[in-house]
Amino acid sequence: MQPDQEVINRWTGSAPYWEKNREIIGRMFAPITRALAEDGEIGRGQVVLDIATGPGEPALSLAAVVGPEGKIFGIDPIPEMVAGARRAAEELGLRNVQFEVAGADHLPLADNTFDAVISRFGVMFFPSPVDGVREMLRVLKPGKKVALAVWHSVERNPFFYALSRVIDRYFDSPPVPPDAPDPFRFASRGKLLEVVREAGAAVQTERLVQCKIEAAMSVEDFLTLRIEMSEKLREKIGTLSGERLAEVRRRAIESLRGYSTDGRMSFPAEVLVVSGSKALAT
């Protein structure tokens, strides 16, 4: 199944902003990267695949975990994202990372290649999550693990709702179908676990990770960052002008101030990390 064109267009438009803010986003999502490294049992000297890497994260962060004797491969279906990831690797002088354009459900990689396969906030947008996880298991070495991070419920993640509850007052937003590509597609406990089970993982686990998403920036700068990260938010904000735009910005800043202390944003967050192992060869 080919990636949904609407999703491709959305992320293509967002690629310049994600590259611009790559370091900040990397720091904000560092706790989730650590959880994936733990559940994927990633260590020195390993060969690791990062699916839906965007502008290079968490692949770039994990380059230090596997060390110079290891290797990180990052793939993403958006050419502009991959180009940004390659630029970042060159700027950082990393020689143990490689990025390619590819979709999750047709990996151009050999069977039994990787010591771990991870995806941070990517599987929610796969055209066929079961096919994507099957491909992950195919390229994984026997006995090794896939680890996937997805958002838990929106009500437990003010990183999203502190802004969306303000914006949504001004727009008619129809409910998102249960299996539509969306950040909260796998917010219900057990839903992604069943996908991993159906894909054929030998052992499956799910754990709730409670952490903080933090950024050293003002409320105003964070508002700009969140709008830049989301094509949907940019589109909605772009339709407003004059007094209505000023009103939305004022209310958004008021909502976000509750998560700001001494020039630092801090949001409690809940993420589900689902893992599965590949059966040992018989």
Image: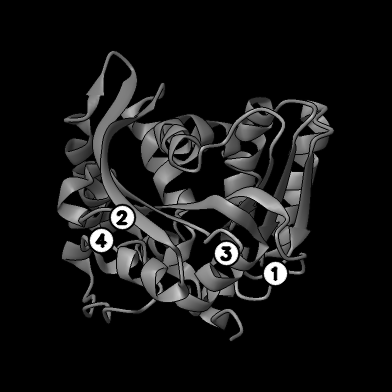
Which sits in the foreground, 203 or 21?
A: 203
Label 1: few (<14), some (14–19) or many (≥20) C-alpha neighbours in 10 Å: some
Q: Amino acid at mark 3?
A: Leu
Q: Give the CA separation, mark 2 to mark 4.
A: 31 Å
Is residue 219 toward the left or the right of residue 16 in the image? left
Where residue 186 appears, x then y in whole percent? 31, 65
| Nearer mark to the viewer, of 3 and 2 | 3
Image marks 3 and 2: residues in contact by CB distance under 8 Å: no
Q: Residue at x 72, y 31 (%)?
A: 45
Question: Is residue 1 positioned above or below 106 on the image?
Answer: below
Where residue 150 appears, x then y in whole percent? 36, 54
Q: Which numbered disc, 4 or 1, marks the residue that appears first in the sequence?
A: 1
Disc ID at residue 72 = none
Q: Residue at x 58, y 64 (%)?
A: 136
Q: Is disc 2 placed on a helix, strand or loop? A: helix
Q: Give the CA separation, mark 4 to mark 1.
A: 26 Å
Q: Give the CA separation, mark 2 to mark 1.
A: 43 Å
Label 2: few (<14), some (14–19) or many (≥20) C-alpha neighbours in 10 Å: few
| Nearer mark to the viewer, of 2 and 1 | 1
Q: Amino acid at mark 2?
A: Leu
Q: Amino acid at mark 4?
A: Ala
Badge 3 is on which residue? 137
Badge 1 is on which residue? 107
Where residue 240 appears, x then y in whole percent? 34, 63
| Nearer mark to the viewer, of 2 and 4 | 4
Image marks 2 and 4: residues in contact by CB distance under 8 Å: no
Disc ID at residue 187 = 4
Disc ID at residue 245 = 2
> In the figure, residue 20 lies in which quadrant?
top right
Residue 249 shows in this picture: no
